Amino acid sequence: MTAHPGPDQASDAALVEAYRAGSQAAASELVTRHARAVGRFLYSAGASQSDVEDLAQEAFFRAFRRLDSWRGDASFRSWLFSIARNLLKDEFRKRRGRQVLSLEDRDLPNRDDPAGEVEALEAAERMRVGLKDLPRLQREVFLLRVQEGSSYDEIAVALDTTPGAARVHYHHAVKRLKELLA
């Protein structure tokens, strides 16, 4: 079953073709359009805040060097997530899985409600710890589904699995996170 490209996919495909024809503006638009999502994915998947920008930049370098390998059967964003995911796995292997996760410079709740701020920070910390403790595939499926709004088909392509397996991983991730936050 072939998915029909949505407006963003068609636009991304047109930008890719324009870049292949020599348009640097097209490359800039692709980076502008997807950089924040790639950064959020990397950070949520365990990259330190100080490494996110470098990792995202490297993901785009790799993507543009390998642009001929994007077949267009998945969204450009899903393809970028798969590159970012592989890059992060390489980084974890290099560092032997040891990561110090910075909680500084994150978005903070409204400071007008100190009790609400404390509660939100505690919930965010429990969620971050819970995400960190999930098995890698469950964590990545959950982040792509919740944070990026990706479909199970897109997640399957990005993570090299099946849509059914993505659903199962998502279900298990939600169940474990609910237990942690209850």
Image: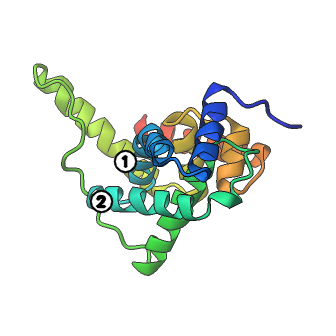
- Res 138 seen here: no
* Circle number at residue 128: 1
Please say if 127 is above or below 55: above
At label 2, which amino acid type do we have?
A: Leu
Where in the figure is residue 21, as x and y percent of width and height?
Answer: 61, 50
Residue 25 or 137: which is nearer the viewer?
A: 25
Of the residues shown, which amino acid type is indicated by label 1? Arg
| Quadrant location of the N terminus in the rendered image | top right
Q: In this figure, which residue is indicated by the disc labeled 2?
A: 101
Residue 28 point in image, percent of width and height: 43, 45
Q: Which one is nearer the viewer's eye here, 86 or 97?
A: 86
Task: Give the structural element (helix, strand or loop) at label 1.
Answer: helix
Mark 1 → mark 2, Cα distance in angstroms: 9 Å
Q: Residue at x 24, y 42 (%)?
A: 106
Seen in the image, is 120 located left or right of residue 139? Answer: left
Foreground residue among 102 and 130? 102
Upstream in sequence: badge 1 or badge 2: 2
What's the colour scheme? rainbow
